[in-house]
Image: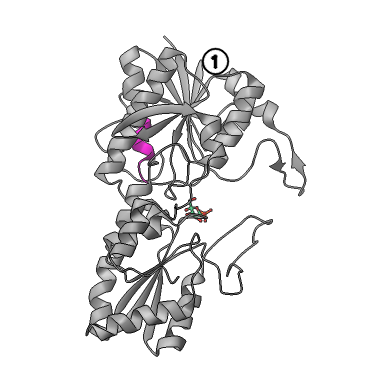
């Protein structure tokens, strides 16, 4: 039997444990061993390598329901330019590759997003080891797959927030601004805004003006409704074209805070009382939705099947009601933002939701 490694890498999201569970089940079906590497590639830097043996005794009925990742993860430390304690960057890729070989693995399954895949692909090429990727990101910004694990749950959390904001908005006749995550893409804001009945959705892909937002709020008032819901994606820029919080932590791009800016501008332009909610990491931590559990399970099974077939350097992907696989380099190369002619943008426009444009 084979011995396969699995790791989670980059920001966590709901559904990671469901992928791990599916991989363990499928591998057990083949009579293979699974080693869960701890904290992404960090586990392979330690000596001895940090891992948990995974078999059917680890993956009980609770596991699929749990948020987070039982293996831990990290989004710090590109092994090719690893930040050392003294502030220098060091190429530690050989240590990671050594860690992989120390475990005597036949293949590695990496659950990650575009950043993690770029690193894993480079490591696999250099170290000559077989690798398969499973896409996860709440941002849904990976190309070549319709959905990534974690996105559906993040949208569900944002919709629930809007469901809870609506009655308090109505009671107080306020404009409620909800800032959601999504990194450089507006997918979470767009989907949650439509499903949560927002009046305005601001996404980084569509430039906005405060005048257009204000006129939408006047239109809403003209219908006799004196409150409104506004969803803002974290990467939306100020009118001056800057982010609100940026370049913290060694130049790493960080978002957050644009909701306050938009709330203030709307208050000034309309005289409405505004309140701002920044949803943040709540979007990552919950129990995975049924849809995320399904996608995670299907991905996990298919990833193990790819190893059985000897198909490597591929990413499992969701397409047209099923699972396919694509070259991982294609997924890395195709970052997916919201397309302006997409069905959801058209739907939002058809519902008279304003993008502020
Ligand atoms: O990529 C997932 C994500 O949650 C983004 O939506 C967000 O911008 C970022 O990660 C937050 O990163 P961190 O967890 O490091 O604060």
Residue 140 vs residue 156, the one in the foreground: 140
Report whether 142 appears left or right of 18.
right
Residue 84 vs residue 123, the one in the foreground: 123
Rendered location of residue 212, percent (x, y):
43, 77
Q: Which residues are magenta?
A: 14-20
Asked whether residue 234 appears in the rendered view, the answer is yes
**Label 1 CB less than 8 angstroms from ligand 1:** no
User: Which corner quadrant holds the C terminus?
Assistant: bottom left
Q: Which residue is mark 1?
A: 104
Look at the image and say whether residue 61 sits in the magenta stretch: no
Label 1 SS? loop
Quarter of image, res 59: top left
Instruction: Give the vertical position of 165 relative to 223 (above or below).
Output: above
Rendered location of residue 65, percent (x, y):
28, 42
Q: Residue placed at 38% from the left, 42% from the top?
A: 147
Q: Residue placed at 44% from the left, 57% from the top?
A: 186
Rendered location of residue 121, percent (x, y):
58, 29
Quarter of image, res 172: bottom left
Instruction: Give the vertical position of 304 relative to 297 (above or below).
Output: above
Disc 1 packing (10 Å; few <14; some 14–19; many ≥20)? few
Q: Residue furthest top?
A: 1
Q: Main secondary structure of the magenta part?
A: helix
Quarter of image, res 246: bottom right
């Amino acid at each position: 039997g084979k011995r396969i490694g699995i790791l989670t890498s980059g920001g966590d999201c709901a559904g990671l444990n469901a992928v791990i569970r599916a991989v363990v089940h499928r591998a057990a079906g083949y009579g293979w061993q699974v080693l869960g590497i701890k904290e992404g590639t960090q586990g392979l830097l330690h000596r001895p390598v940090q891992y948990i043996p995974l078999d059917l005794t680890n993956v009980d009925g609770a596991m699929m329901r749990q948020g987070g990742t039982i293996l831990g993860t990290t989004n710090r430390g590109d092994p090719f330019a690893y930040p050392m304690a003294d502030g220098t960057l060091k190429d530690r890729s050989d240590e990671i590759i050594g860690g992989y070989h120390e475990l005597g693995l036949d293949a590695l399954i990496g659950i990650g997003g575009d950043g993690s895949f770029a690193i894993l692909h480079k490591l696999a090429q250099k170290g000559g080891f077989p690798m398969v990727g499973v896409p996860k990101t709440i941002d849904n910004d990976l190309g070549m797959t319709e959905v990534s694990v974690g996105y559906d749950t993040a949208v569900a959390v944002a919709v629930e927030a809007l469901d809870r904001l609506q009655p308090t908005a109505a009671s107080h006749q306020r404009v409620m601004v909800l800032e959601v995550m999504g990194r450089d893409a507006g997918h979470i804001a767009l989907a949650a805004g439509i499903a949560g009945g927002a009046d305005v959705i601001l996404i980084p892909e569509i430039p906005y003006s405060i005048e257009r937002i204000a006129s939408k709020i006047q239109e809403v008032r003209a219908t006799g409704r004196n409150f409104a819901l506004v969803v803002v994606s974290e990467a939306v820029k100020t009118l001056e074209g800057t982010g609100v919080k940026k370049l913290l932590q060694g130049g790493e791009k960080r978002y957050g805070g644009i909701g306050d800016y938009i709330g203030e501008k709307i208050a000034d332009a309309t005289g409405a009382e505004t309140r701002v909610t920044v949803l943040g990491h709540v979007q990552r931590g919950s129990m995975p939705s049924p849809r995320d559990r399904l996608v995670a399970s299907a991905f996990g099974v298919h990833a193990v099947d790819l190893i059985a077939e000897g198909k490597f350097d591929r990413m499992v992907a969701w397409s047209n009601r099923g699972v396919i696989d694509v070259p991982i380099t294609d997924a890395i190369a195709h970052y997916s933002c919201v397309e302006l002619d997409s069905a959801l943008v058209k739907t939002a426009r058809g519902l008279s939701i304003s993008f502020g444009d």
